[in-house]
Image: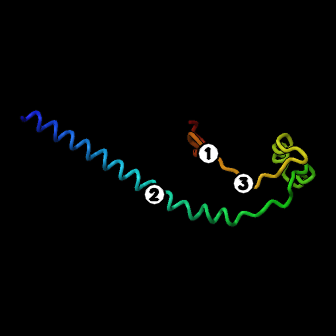
Amino acid sequence: MALFSRLACLALGIGFFVAAATVLATLGAHRWAAATDAPLARLQTSRMPATAASSDASELGGLPASVQRYFHPVLNDGQRIISAATVEHTGTFQLSLNDEQ
């Protein structure tokens, strides 16, 4: 009887822990969504439409040389302008200027 009582208490404790973790994770997800939805909506509504429908290499002339070196291989004349993109990141960002990760 004592063993059954201990197992019942252990099962009850584990069940309580799992339930509490689930509630906290759900609450955290809802708080995150509430905190990020409004700024994201403001960004979406303030987005300006592209001024041109396609790219033109002559528009890169006023940019710094390093930016031109980046854009020349990746932009083709007549390529459609992308007005918005969704990017997902997996991993970590190196925030230190001195340490390597």
Name the residue carrying label 1.
Answer: 88
Distance Cα–Cα, label 1 vs label 3: 13 Å
Please tell me the numbered disc located at residue 84.
3
Distance Cα–Cα, label 1 vs label 2: 20 Å
Q: Which residue is at a point 84% across and 61% down the rendered structure image?
A: 51
Up/down of 78 relative to 51, above or below? above
Q: Which residue is at a point 31% across and 48% down the rendered structure image?
A: 19
Q: State the image coordinates of residue 68 (x, y, percent, origin top left).
A: 85, 47
Name the residue carrying label 2.
Answer: 30
Q: Which residue is at a point 84% across and 43% down the rendered structure image?
A: 69
Which amino acid, mark 2? His
Distance Cα–Cα, label 2 vs label 3: 25 Å
Circle nearer the N terminus (1, 2)? 2
Q: Which residue is at a point 61% across and 63% down the rendered structure image?
A: 41
Dot 2 lies on which element? helix
Which amino acid, mark 1? Glu
Say few, some or many: other residues with alpha carbon within 10 Å of mark 2 (under 14 / 14 to 19 / 20 or more).
Answer: few
